[in-house]
Image: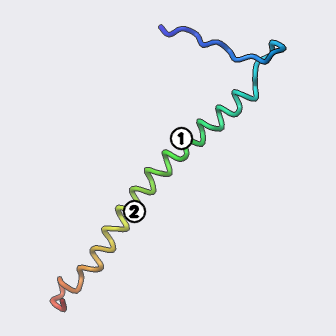
Amino acid sequence: MTEPQEIRRRPDGSIDTGFYMARGRRLRSEAAHDMAGSAVGQSRGVFARLVMLVAALPFFRGEG
């Protein structure tokens, strides 16, 4: 079992909510960038295949 993490606190002893809010924003941003990056990579692949197909059509028709 993992050890519980220490809660980050301010000098007055209260929980450092600003730290945890900034951490949550950073983690959500990283997750969104990861998701968008994989989607962009997939769409680039589809777009590249479509361009290659269109470029090759004259050769299939014999107009090459």
User: Residue 5 appears in which quarter of the rendering?
Assistant: top right
Q: Where in the figure is residue 20, as x and y percent of width and height?
A: 69, 27
Given residues 16 and 47, the one toward you in this image is 16
The residue wearing badge 1 is: 31
Query: Residue 28 at x, y = what percent?
Result: 60, 39
Image position of 15 with respect to 18: above or below: above
Which sits earlier in the primary sequence, circle 1 or circle 2? 1
Give the percent coordinates (x, y) of residue 6. 64, 12
* Residue type, label 1: Ala
Describe the element under mark 1 as helix, strand or loop: helix
Q: Which residue is mark 2?
A: 44
Q: What is the crowding at mark 2: few (fewer than 14 residues within 10 Å), some, or many (at least 20)?
A: few
- For the residue marked with disc 2, what is the amino acid? Arg
The number of discs equals 2
The residue located at (75%, 22%) in the rendering is 16
Q: Residue at x 81, y 15 (%)?
A: 11
Q: Is residue 10 left or right of residue 49?
A: right
Callout 1: 10 Å neighbours few (<14), some, many (20+)?
A: few
Where residue 48 appears, as percent x and y from the top left, is 34, 68
Q: Observer-nearest residue: 56 or 22?
A: 22
Query: Taking 37 as reference, is 48 above or below it?
Result: below
Q: Image check: 39 left or right of 4?
A: left
Name which quarter of the figure residue 13 lies in. top right
Residue that appears at 27% across and 75% down: 53
Task: Locate residue 64: give its quadrant.
Answer: bottom left
Would you say 2 lies left or right of 48 here? right
